Image (cartoon, rainbow, N blue to C red):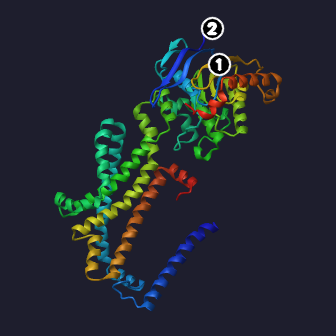
Amino acid sequence: MKASWKNIAEPVVFFVALLVLWEILVEIIKVPAFILPPPRDLWVAFIKKLPILGNHALITFIEAFGGFVLSLVLGVGFAIAVVYSRHLQNTIYPLIVILYAMPKSAFAPLMVIWVGYGLFSKIAIAFLVAFFPIVVNTVVGLKEVEPELLELARINRGSDLDVFKKIRLPNSLPYMFAGIKVAIVLSVTGAIVAEFVAANQGLGYLVLQANYSLDTAFALVILLTLAVLSLGLFWLAEILQRKLAPWSAAVREVEGSF
Amino acid sequence: MPPLISVEEVSRVFTGGARAVTALERVSFEIQTGNFVSIVGPSGCGKSTLLKIISGLLPPSSGKISVGGKRVDQPLENVGMVFQAPVLLKWRSVLGNVLLPVEFGKLDVAGYLDKARALIQLVGLAGFEEMFPHELSGGMQQRASLCRALVTDPQLLLMDEPFGALDAMTRDELDIELLRIWEERKKTVLFVTHSIQEAVFLSDVVFVMSARPGRLLETIVINLPRPRTVEMMSAVKFGEYTLKIRSLLSTAGGGHAAAAGSTM
């Protein structure tokens, strides 16, 4: 109990101290506000522009989450297909690996040509960056099954469908969630990069506007909003994992890697 | 009475790697119904390979196996398997794990519930039915895996170094439990181990195998009274059996191969 209270108090004290230090240092050194505004200015910008911030954050959320959901559905489906079909493994999988080696954000200008200027080009980029971690992790999870379990299934005349439903799929869940947690944060980055390239709405567009008008305080507020958005999505994945695959949490606690 | 298992001139060569490896060379033996039989030998002598061939999971390169008078050419039906690791499903309770073979075999799960609970009680896991594998010790996990092997009431139990990964005390404890269950349930057990003591303590018959290529060195009938007790391990006769097997293995160069080889 004592330790968990400390685990909350320590970061709170640290961040408050950091803010105070920031405020004081900016005041003493007299840094121009367009380079580094004091935290007080960030707060003012936040309150003043809250409605605009909210509208654009919603757009970015739709783009990122849309791309993520698409990558989850197609990624898991693709992973299952690759694991069960040697033909796909020999043909499509190498293609995916080549795509994986390309910087996905470099597709953003092309996406504007292919799917247009609107929401869909951003969803496409968010999808592209989120797709690979989900595929790669799910493939590993579906494959890394103890061979003895498969022998057990053969001896007891288990069907392929049963092996998938009762062994491979649940076995892959902790891996899948590891991929999901990477993918969901990457999808926000993907949406922002796509907005940088061509957009008239969204937080990526907004941060460029703030930069053009040297409104550094607002730019920083937008970055913090993005952090909150990403963390919120990450926590959502974490909560879902605890509900759907509690055994992975148990394993992780034992390993102490979280 | 005809033997339950008959192994005739079985060889197995693995050709996957850079050079062919002969895991088993012309192994022949018979196992009578209801017997507790152990295969003992150094690591890499093909014990596990032999077990897989008998179960029908792996075809022999040459030779013939029959179980119950029928030639084995596909995975055996109604056989229980216990592996070196418990390999329980992490996302299922003890009861759920024990019922897995029932579900695979498309049998009536509800009808097997009482049987599963009785088995769980028999191995001393009563009260742990709803616990998950990570909440159990290694010994308890292996007990659950024994229940899983027994739930469909197979006539034959194949055990591949099932207690090899456990500490010595837990291992002794489980050996005694296994004998108690065997005497109560009247199964034929084929038990692979690299512990000479364990083989002598458990078995009616011990097959001693040489290091790679695995050959049958000798068949030793253990004439010790049943039920076996821990005290018997200090009996003169027990010592004679273990000494005999040890000298068989050392003259066959088993010790050296055990250090160099790996488990097949």
The quarter of the picture where residue A139 lies is top left
> Residue B170 placed where, x, y %?
70, 38
| Left or right of A98 on screen, residue A230 | right
> Total label count?
2
> Residue A180 placed where, x, y %?
40, 55
Residue at 63% x, 44% y is B136
| Left or right of A220 on screen, residue A115 | left
Quadrant housing the N terminus of chain B: top right
Quadrant housing the C terminus of chain B: top right
| Left or right of A16 on screen, residue B208 | right
Q: Cα distance, mark 1 to mark 2?
A: 25 Å
Foreground: disc 1 or disc 2: 1
Residue at 25% x, 77% y is A209
Q: Is B74 or B18 nearer to us in this picture?
A: B18
User: In this rendering, does residue A205 appear at all?
Assistant: yes
Q: Are marks 1 and 2 on the same chain?
A: yes
Q: Is B53 or A171 nearer to us in this picture?
A: B53
Residue at 49% x, 84% y is A21
B252 up-or-down from B2: above or below: below
Label 2 sits on a secondary structure element that is loop
Task: Identify which amino acid the numbered label 1 is placed on.
Answer: Leu
> Residue B27 placed where, x, y %?
57, 17
Q: Residues within 10 Å of mark 2 (few under 14, many from 20)?
A: few
| Left or right of B195 on screen, residue B145 | left
> Which residue does the numbered mark 1 point to in the structure image?
B217
Task: Identify which amino acid the numbered label 2 is placed on.
Answer: Met
A138 up-or-down from A19: above or below: above
Q: Is A106 or A64 nearer to us in this picture?
A: A106
Give the letter of the chain under mark 1. Answer: B
> Which residue does the numbered mark 2 point to in the structure image?
B1
